[in-house]
Amino acid sequence: MFLFRLPFANACRRCALVLVATLATVPLASCKSSRDVTGSINATARGQDTGFMAQLARQYDRAPEDKSAAMPYATALRNAGRTSEAVAVLQRLAASRPQDREVLAAYGKALAEGGRLQEAASVLRSAHTPERPDWTVLSAQGSVSDKLGDHRAAQAFYISALRIAPGEPSVLSNLGLSFALTKNLPEAEQALRQASAHPRADARVRQNLSLVLALQGKMDEAEQIQRRDLPMEQATANILAMRQMTARTNTERSSAPAPQQSVTPNRPKAR
């Protein structure tokens, strides 16, 4: 899953809030399209298994341009945190299969996860077509756009993804965080509430909702979410950090100079 931290989260850097972006975030392995050849393995659970990794590596070494060997190996590498190696594997595979959109999608997502955003944006554009769009690619494009600071484009990507996959919690969570990045907190809350209500929503989505609620001063509900999902010690630390963050924000607002009033000319009412 694509992860990024919202700029205003620097105010609570010490808290353990997980901010998702799918990108987040759409997970590269656990939330796959039906065409994903890695669907036969649980790479997320087994990515840290050195024996399993060695087996995938041997299969890959025998046929590095074989999609059925390279794709599972790249997925396992990514899940083990070895993103640069996963990118190298997929780059070689994409060079041998430049028209394979599934390979391009995996390559583009890995590039994004590795922080190579401009390259990721370029590859992801070729990973699907207007007549056959892939919602996971659209969501990845949104995550890349958010990270590049183009939030309007990001939100358009997420909305397009939701037309294909209505109610998908990972996309709704990304959309909510994108709204938060543009300080549109009511819209962020609405999207994150919808994401949190989905049966497949996990604690990370609810933590994002908790943070957005705290930013709006809705501390009681934000604290309830923290205590429901997290161990007591971690929840307490997060709540303290959020309270400090909102207190600083309120102090900054109250100390800011009042805007000068201007005379607005009377305008004729529209008829």
Image (cartoon, rainbow, N blue to C red):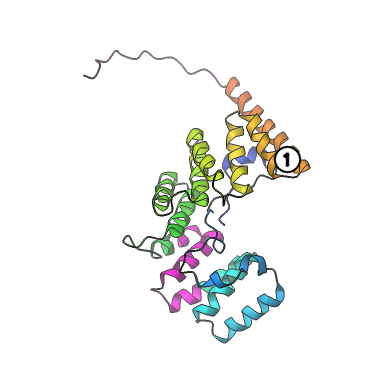
Question: For the C terminus, which image quadrant?
Answer: top left
Vertical order, 61 against 82 (above or below): below
At which x and y percent is residue 164? 40, 54
Q: Main secondary structure of the magenta part?
A: helix
Label 1 element class: helix
Is 115 colored magenta in this rendering? yes
At 52% from the left and 79% from the top, the residue drawn is 68
- Out of 46 and 105, give the one closest to the viewer: 46
Question: For the N terminus, which image quadrant?
Answer: bottom right
Q: Quadrant of residue 127?
A: bottom left
Vertical order, 82 against 186 (above or below): below
Which residue is under mark 1? Answer: 235
Is 237 colored magenta in this rendering? no
Label 1 sits on what residue type? Ala
At which x and y percent is residue 208? 59, 43
Q: Quadrant of residue 206?
A: top right
Q: Quadrant of residue 211?
A: top right
Q: Which residues are magenta?
A: 91-120
At which x and y percent is residue 120? 47, 61
At 53% from the left and 46% from the top, the residue drawn is 173
Q: Residue furthest right?
A: 233
Q: Residue furthest bottom?
A: 62
Vertical order, 132 against 189 (above or below): below
At which x and y percent is residue 229? 69, 44
At 49% from the left and 67% from the top, the residue drawn is 106
How many numbered circles does the render carry?
1
Around disc 1, counting alpha carbons within 10 Å, would you say few (fewer than 14), some (14 to 19), or many (20 or more)? many
Judged left or right of residue 83, residue 149 is left
At 67% from the left and 35% from the top, the residue drawn is 224
